[in-house]
Image: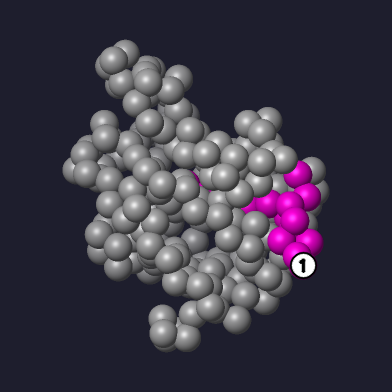
Amino acid sequence: MKNPNLALVHAIIPAGEPWTGHLRRGQTLRIVDQQGNQSADTVFYAADPQGKINPQERYSATDTLVAQRSLYLTTGSRLYSNQGRVLLTIIADTCGRHDTIGGACSCESNSVRYPRSTQHMHSCRDTFLRGLRENHPELTKRDLPPNINFFMNVPVTPDGHLSFADGVSGPGKYVEMLAETDVVVLISNCPQLNNPCNAYNPTPLEVLIWI
C-alpha cells in the first residue's frame, strides 16, 4: 500500500467543494471516501504536459461502457475519452463498483427527484462550474461531459430504470487510477442533502497523487 507521506499531492475536499488537479502520465490518483457513502462526482479532460486542457477531448461514459461491456467501473476498468483513447485505468478499488450512468445532481434533477423546494439547492453541476470558473475559465458548461460517480450505487432495475440505492462504500474505502496520458481532474464532492444514501450528511473526500 502506498505511503500517504510520500504523495506529491495530499488534499482534503470539504463536502460541496470542487477540486482540480493535473495528473501526469504514469502518476497515480487515489480518491478516498473518508467517512463512507459519499459521492465523488468526477470528470477528466485530456491535457498537455503543462496541464493545459484540450476541451475537445474528455472522459466519455458511452465509450467507456461500450469498451468495458459493463455498467459499473472497478479494478481493471479503462476510462476512455470521446476520441477513443484510454485516459486512465483503475488499478485498485476497495469499494467494489462505481457508477457512470447516474450523472451529476443539478437544479433540474433536484426538482424531479425531490420536493420542488429543493430546486435551487446547491448541486454538483454548480460545483463543477465553479471549479472550472476558478481554475479553467476558458471552459463553460458546454464543456461538462457526463461524469463518474465514484462510491455511488445506482443499480439498473429489470425494466431499465435507475435506482439510487444505499451506498456500497464505507469509511476509508478508496479507488486508485493510473494516468495513461496527461489529464486534468475535476471533482465535485457532492453536496446533496436529500439523498438517504449518505444519511443526509455530506462528508469530506481525500485526494492523493503519487509518481
Outermost residue on the left side: it is 199
Can residue 147 be seen? no
Q: Is residue 86 above or below residue 165?
A: below
- Left or right of 18 in this view: 110: left
- Left or right of 91 in this view: 166: left
Look at mark 1 in the image and give the residue it sits on: 49
Tell me what residue is drawn at x 27 percent, y 35 percent: 193
Can residue 201 be seen? yes
Q: Let me know if residue 44 is in the magenta part.
A: yes
Q: Nearer the viewer, residue 21 or 153?
A: 21
Q: Quadrant of the C terminus?
A: bottom right
Tell me what residue is drawn at x 41 percent, y 85 percent: 5
- What residue span does the magenta drawing correspond to? 41-55
- Quarter holding residue 194: top left
Q: Nearer the viewer, residue 54 or 104?
A: 54
Outermost residue on the top side: it is 116
Q: Is residue 146 above or below residue 177?
A: above
Tell me what residue is drawn at x 55 percent, y 55 percent: 20
Residue 75 appears at what percent x and percent y? 51, 67
- Left or right of 83 in this view: 122: left
Tell me what residue is drawn at x 72 percent, y 40 percent: 138
Q: Is residue 158 above or below residue 181?
A: above
Report crowding for label 1: few under 14, some 14 to 19, many 20 or more residues within 10 A (C-alpha): some
